[in-house]
Image: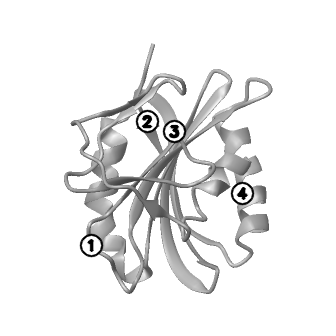
């Protein structure tokens, strides 16, 4: 679950300007996703790809990322979620889950959840959708300030809807 949590610690986001095609494809990790128009691809350890908003909120760059975790064995979605909850509280002791609901990600059963917590002294809001496909977990996370939650929602919704697992 470490890669899942790496996507949460995004304060060290380094923006790398780039021109993006409509879709970002990561053949090595087996997925494609479409970032919002104008969002810039960046780099942060522990995630396959991260995109930062062109507009900061309260000094923070809202962002969307995809983390991919190769699992040692097949795991149910429920078991992955429970293991992730344990790791979440280790990484962000102040984390408070505000919603959890079933959904789909790339046509696979998934879980969507929101939570807030303090990371490196910053109060943040997270929205996350994850699925387990065989021995691989895909975790999409959107992060912003609590005041930016409503603004992030349509971007995260589009990001999740665009996600595809490559065959």
Give the residue displayed 51% in from the left and 38% down from the top: 110
The answer to whether the residue labelled 2 contacts the one labelled 3, judged by CB atoms less than 8 Å apart, is yes
Q: Nearer the viewer, residue 53 or 139?
A: 53
Give the labeled residue for mark 3: 110
Q: Nearer the viewer, residue 99 or 51?
A: 51
Position of the C terminus by quadrant: top left
Mark 2 burial class by Cα count in 10 Å: few <14, some 14-19, many 20+:
many
Give the numbered dot on residue 85.
4
Give the residue displayed 32% in from the left and 65% down from the top: 152
Give the labeled residue for mark 2: 105
Give the mark nearest the N terminus, 3 or 4. Answer: 4
Q: Position of residue 32 (x, y in %)?
A: 38, 30
110 left or right, relative to 42: right
In whole angstroms, how far apart are the C-alphas of marks 1 and 4?
A: 30 Å
From what the image shows, is residue 157 above or below residue 15? above
Give the mark nearest the N terminus, 1 or 4. Answer: 1
Q: Mark 2 or mark 1, which is nearer to you?
A: 1
Give the numbered dot on residue 55.
1
Q: Secondary structure at mark 1?
A: loop
């Amino acid at each position: 679950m470490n890669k899942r949590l790496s996507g949460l610690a995004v304060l060290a986001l380094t923006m790398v300007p780039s021109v993006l095609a409509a879709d970002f494809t990561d053949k090595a990790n087996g997925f494609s996703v479409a970032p919002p128009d104008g969002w810039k691809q960046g780099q942060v350890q522990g995630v396959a790809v991260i995109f930062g908003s062109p507009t900061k909120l309260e000094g923070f760059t809202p962002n969307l990322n995809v983390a991919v975790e190769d699992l040692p064995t097949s795991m149910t979605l429920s078991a992955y979620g429970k293991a992730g909850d344990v790791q979440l509280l280790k990484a962000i002791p102040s984390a408070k889950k505000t919603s959890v609901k079933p959904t789909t990600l790339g046509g696979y059963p998934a879980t969507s959840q929101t939570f807030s917590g303090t990371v490196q002294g910053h109060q943040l809001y997270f929205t996350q959708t994850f699925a387990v496909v065989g021995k691989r977990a895909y975790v999409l996370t959107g992060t912003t300030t609590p005041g930016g939650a409503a603004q992030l929602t349509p971007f995260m919704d589009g990001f999740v809807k665009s996600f595809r697992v490559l065959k």
